[in-house]
Amino acid sequence: MPELPEVETYRRYFEETALGQTVVDVKAEDPRRQLTTDYDTFVRALKGTKFVGTHRIGKHFLINLSSGKVLVLHFGMTGDLAYYRDEEDTPRFARIVFYFQNGFRLAFIDSRKFGRVGLADSIEAYQQAKALGPDALDITLEDLKLKLVKRKAPIKPLLLDQKILAGIGNWIADEVLFQAKINPARLANSLSLAEYEALHAAIQWVLNTAIDHEANYQTFPKSFLIHARGWDEVVETTASERQVCPRHRTPLTITKVGGRTTYFCSICQPL
């Protein structure tokens, strides 16, 4: 599933290719499934408008239109973007295609069809309708502490709650807590100020590092816990070789916290 780093990478790709382009047509393969806005309304709203700005809230990508409306893309499990010119270059699984005045096209690609595209009146209206908290990269230490410090609940599920802060998925939560040396089952109201400072710094560092690497997990620093998950397809290792703490080389604990599979080091992250 595209997480915040992937979506930020898509946003930057969009800015390098499609930003400033005028839409002359839009086609959707299965509009009833893929669009959250009526197809005819969607096409009328897009035709003749220009993409004038971009914004991201967590995993949600928003594009400002010259009409004042906002185009919203949520990438589901397998969403992606491709900018191209010729029909023969149309990517496989191109579900929605935007045609531009300059002759190029932008495809919303989605093999599993869980992605959604639609219109919103404004970024603020969309964020409110979806009950999204502040973007995980934008939240301040003070706001993060304010949202969590009185919560008598494990810290990991709270980090995953998009109403608290938007954009942290399962592996990111594990990585952030590992880097901050906080046990995922620790109650939020038990964390010290120093631990909140470490948590906030880890959120920034993990997300910015992932973005800098364009969400290519294989190139992440060796100090990252994510390599234990076995997503590095080019690295041939057994689970027992992989699932060790990058700091201590001792076996990781793999359990469920808040119903989600969780990796942590009992030495680095004592309860």
Image (spheres, helix red, strand yellow):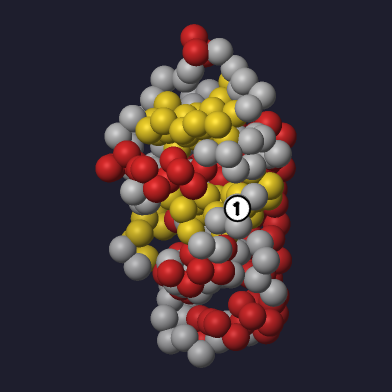
The residue depicted at 68 percent of the width and 31 percent of the height is 17
Q: Nearer the viewer, residue 12 or 219?
A: 12
Q: Which residue is mark 1?
A: 67
User: In the rendered image of this protein, does residue 12 appear above or below residue 150?
Assistant: above
Left/right placement of residue 256 relative to residue 15 reads left
Task: Locate residue 125, reporting x and y percent.
Answer: 51, 69
Can you give x and y, in whole percent of width and height, for residue 248 in the image?
60, 52
Q: Is residue 113 above or below residue 247?
A: above
Report the number of discs. Answer: 1
Q: Please tell me which residue lies in front, 42 or 205.
A: 42
Apparent side of residue 264 relative to residue 135 in the rendered image (left or right): left
Residue furthest bottom in the image:
150
Q: Indicate the amino acid at tag 1.
A: Ser
Residue 85 can be seen in this image:
yes
In percent of the image, x 56 and y 69: which residue is there? 124
Residue pictured at 42% horizontal, 45% vertical: 42
